[in-house]
Image: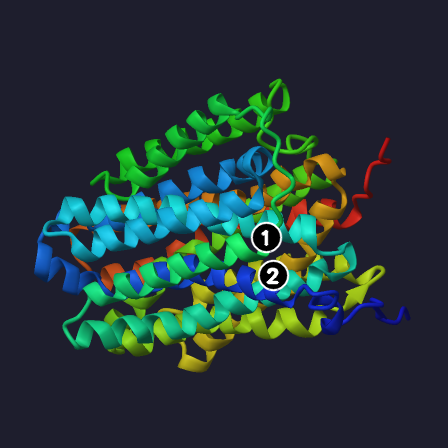
Amino acid sequence: MAKAEVTDGGWADVVGEGRFPLFALICLGVWLTAADSLVTATIMPSVGQALGGYGYFGWATAGFLLGSVMAGASSGLLAQRYGLRLGMAGAALVYATGCALSAAAPEILGFLAGRVLQGIGGGWVVGFCSVAIGLLFPDRTLARVYAAITSVWGIATLVGPLLGGVFADAGAWRWVFWFFAIQGAGVALVALRLLPRGGADAGSAVAWPQLGLIALAVAAIGYADVAGGALGAGLLTALGVAILVFTVRFDARASVRLLPKGSDDLSEIPGSGYATMFLLTAASMGFSVYGPQVLQTLRGYSALFAGYVVALEALAWTAAALPVSSLAGRWPARMIRLGALCILAGLGLCALAFGHWPLPAVVAAAALLGAGFGLSWAFMSQKIITALPAEERAIGSAAITTVRMTGAAAGAALAAVVANLLGFDEGVTVPVAEAVSVWVFAAVLPVAALGVWTAWRLGAAEPAPQS
């Protein structure tokens, strides 16, 4: 039986050679986007009472997501053109400006405009963080760095709703955005001091056609959530996904590319890696979007308790990611495959347990789902980045963020289509919640199974020889 192999470098290696300040900056940058979305979801009822516009609530998420995907998709190219220092500082200032606009908004449209700016700035910040990881950390440390980033998302999932609840209960929802605006400005100042000036290439072209196609696709997927009918939502989701597939094909043949070579080929590491990330993320979104509402309706849980039951997924992600981050040799491929299987099994258990099984079964489903991502995500990221030539690491690293956010958008829209077909858009009754508790998970099992297949291909793929 093969023994687990451990890398030469440990956590001390991650922060060694003066990398601790850079590591801390990356964690803070990821925190901005991770916590922002969770806090905002908690305070939206307070925003609605103050500003009105309940019909536009979907766009508080859709606008943020649209901005994030667009920005994340362009961050690799912008890092090449302007360098990490100016890119990260500018992105953080855009984010801070968006927070200030939402904080000071006198009406809902101003608030939503601020959310779009937050999405753009936050997407750039996370994208530049991914680029910085790929460019400034040794390959041997990448799994641990991504595991640490995962823990930031886990902490944000636990702290975010509580932080939002404190501000909302105090009647001070605007101060949430002032609080994050201050943090955004701090990231900008630290980035100017820490990040290298080099790496800019003023001649780097921008893949505007691909970015335009992504904007169109994400706008279609984002609008599917608020389309008002299952048929319209389904058609918009299908249109958005079709445009994304076309974009990948188009990008592979474009003179100025947005994705690294091989992203359109499932036999190569980038293609199978990005496909696995997209499919597994999309399949899991119904859990976080509809899980809390189902638990409140069927079991009578409070919003806070239901939110923290669902947040166990992120906690399990972190708990699984950290212990395995040092594995090497054959083990990363095994963890990628095992993680995908855990996600598929977790979704299946969700379909059985969310309705009326005892709470420990729901907790087990959440833990299995999160552990699947924890076991696999860092190794998928590491395998993609280390397979890329040096000149493609910037766009390849940024693409990881883009794929994750795009998968989240597609998955949320798909879950909305299923839920609306079951009558969710007409009111959350007990019979509707019972149906949603099964089918919002069962319907995506084929998507997760496809993700298992691509994960198997990724585990077996070997890096192409570098010329």
Q: In the rendered image, which residue does mark 1 sit on?
A: 195
Residue located beneath label 2 in the image: 22
Disc with the residue nearer the chain's start (1 vs 2): 2
Q: Are marks 1 and 2 in contact (CB under 8 Å)?
A: yes
Q: Nearer the viewer, residue 101 or 434?
A: 101
Q: Amino acid at mark 1?
A: Leu
Give the label on residue 21, or none: none
> For the C terminus, which image quadrant?
top right
* Distance of label 1 from label 2 (alpha carbons): 7 Å
Query: Which is nearer the eye, 112 or 220?
Result: 112
Q: Answer with the quarter of the image where residue 326 lies.
A: bottom right
Q: How is the image coloured?
A: rainbow
Residue 85 seen in this snapshot? yes
User: In what element is the residue under mark 1?
Assistant: loop
Q: Is residue 395 above or below residue 451?
A: above
Q: Quadrant of the N terminus?
A: bottom right
Up the image or down, 172 lies above or below 283; here it is below
Percent position of residue 414, x then y: 39, 45
Give the vertical position of 77 relative to 197 (above or below). above
Residue situated in front as seen by the camera: 389 or 445: 389
Q: Residue at x 51, y 73 (%)?
A: 315
Q: How many numbered callouts? A: 2
Q: Write the residue at 58% across / 68% down.
A: 371
